[in-house]
Amino acid sequence: MIRSEIRTQMRTLLNEATEGFWSDANLNSYINLSNQRVNSIISATKEDYFTKSATFSSVAATKSYAFPTDCRFIRRMEHYSTTDASDIEKLDELKFPRTEMNGEWPFTEAGRPKRYLIFGTQFNLEPIPDAVYTMRIYYDSRKDDLAADDESPSSPTDFHDMLVYWACVLANTQNKEDSQEFVGLFNTRKAELVQSLLSRGSDDSNTVEGYLERF
């Protein structure tokens, strides 16, 4: 569903077909809050669901590089050969203050990057690159709010109704009305979403059980 369809479904369930107690702006804000809640459930259940990759080239004698604009945190960094598929080397993250341990900091000579050190929304390559290297980052991507009526959530299409139910819970809070029916619908679909994500394989997240609990 796109945002306008989610809002229409909300108005049907809230029994207010046109703007009245709730303006479209009100409902849009609840939709975005609901969208972020569903995304957080997905991330906790399937940690790599929103993982993306990006490539860039290092610059000789340049240490610092910026995160991709939609990056929440880096999962993996590597450099690789564009001509030899077997030539891939994973970089390890250096965590402050361990950077001064084992005689490995600072790197005294430029070379092929082996580690990276994060500072805010940028990272340093260590040692400083001595040439151009093809780099690849795998990172958890940030999902922005739905800003237009034709935008669709990033969550699985089959579960967009969850946004409707939780947004109705938030709307009824404003109206001081009981929303337990919507809470129940949301929790039922939440359990189904978690099971659907887990059926895709790989290890279970440690936080899955918490998201299966009742509201």
Image: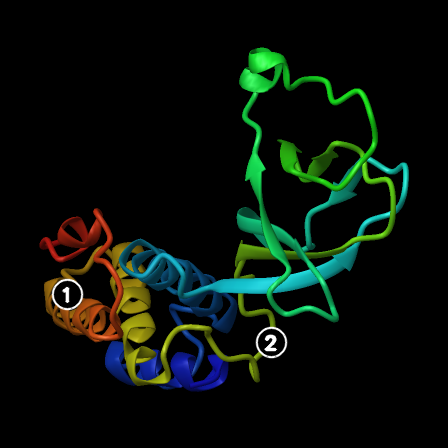
Give left or right: position of 19 versus 105.
Answer: left
Task: Tell me the SS state at disc 1.
Answer: helix
Question: What is the three-letter code of the residue carrying label 2?
Answer: Ala
Against 6, residue 197 (above or below) is above
- Residue 94, percent from left and from top: 57, 29
Q: Residue at x 60, y 65 (%)?
A: 86
- Residue 149, percent from left and from top: 56, 81
Against 170, residue 1 (above or below) is below
What residue did someone put label 1 on? 187
Can residue 141 be seen by looking at this rendering?
A: no
What residue did someone put label 2 on? 148
Q: Where on the picture, by quarter, is residue 183?
A: bottom left
Q: Residue at x 63, y 13 (%)?
A: 103
Q: How is the image coloured?
A: rainbow
The N terminus sits in image quarter:
bottom left
Q: Residue at x 53, y 50 (%)?
A: 76
* Numbered label attached to residue 151: none
Q: Nearer the viewer, mark 1 or mark 2?
A: 1
